Image: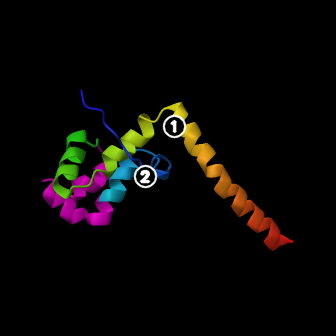
Amino acid sequence: MQQLSLTLEPGLAQRFRDMRECFAACVYQRGLGRVAAACDVAPSNLSTMLSGERNLDSSLIEKYMSEFKDNTPAMYWAARHLQDAGALKNQALAAIPGLVAQLERLVKEAA
């Protein structure tokens, strides 16, 4: 068995409310018409799916990732659902020194 190692972009899970919002950001970054054509759906249908008025089929997200070589949706799901409590704690602890330094700088500027 091979071990999978992921390096997750900091804050990716917090940047979007849900997968629909993450996918919408990816689509609009590349252009709604372009993505719709590549995924073989009408732009108006894709727009309706992204707005939440129509079901968003997961196979459409898979096709997008394959066509555009953009794994952001998959990385979002991984960041959202695969991090264990220990990793989250370690990330929080690692952020403390930088935050303390920033706080000290702000206190000096305010004085």
Q: Which residue is mark 1?
A: 87
Circle 1 packing at 10 Å, graded few (<14), some (14-19), many (20+), is: few
Vertical arrangement, residue 77 with respect to residue 21, above or below: above
Q: Which residue is mark 2?
A: 9
Name the side, left or right, on which 99 lies relative to 9: right
Name the side, left or right, on which 97 lies relative to 107: left
Q: Is residue 84 on the magenta stretch?
A: no
Q: Position of residue 19 (x, y in %)?
A: 37, 45
Name the element at disc 1. Answer: helix
Name the side, left or right, on which 105 lies relative to 58: right
Q: Which residues are magenta?
A: 27-54
User: Cα distance, mark 2 to mark 1?
Assistant: 13 Å
The disc, 2 or 1, on the residue closer to the chain's N-terminal end is 2
Q: Position of residue 73 (x, y in %)?
A: 32, 48
Q: What residue lies at 66% left-to-right and 50% top-to-bottom?
A: 96
Question: Amino acid type of disc 1?
Answer: Ala
Vertical arrangement, residue 42 with respect to residue 105, above or below: above
Q: Quadrant of residue 30?
A: bottom left
- The front one of 59 and 33 is 59
Query: Which numbered dot is residue 98?
Result: none
Q: Quadrant of residue 108?
A: bottom right
Name the element at disc 2. Answer: loop
- The front one of 17 and 68 is 68
Question: Amino acid type of disc 2?
Answer: Glu
Q: Is residue 31 on the magenta stretch?
A: yes
The prevailing secondary structure element of the residues shown in magenta is: helix
Q: Position of residue 91 (x, y in %)?
A: 56, 44
- The front one of 57 and 88 is 88
- Residue 19 seen anywhere in this rendered image of the structure: no
Closest to the camera, between mark 2 and mark 1, is 1
Circle 2 packing at 10 Å, graded few (<14), some (14-19), many (20+), is: few
Q: Quadrant of residue 29?
A: bottom left
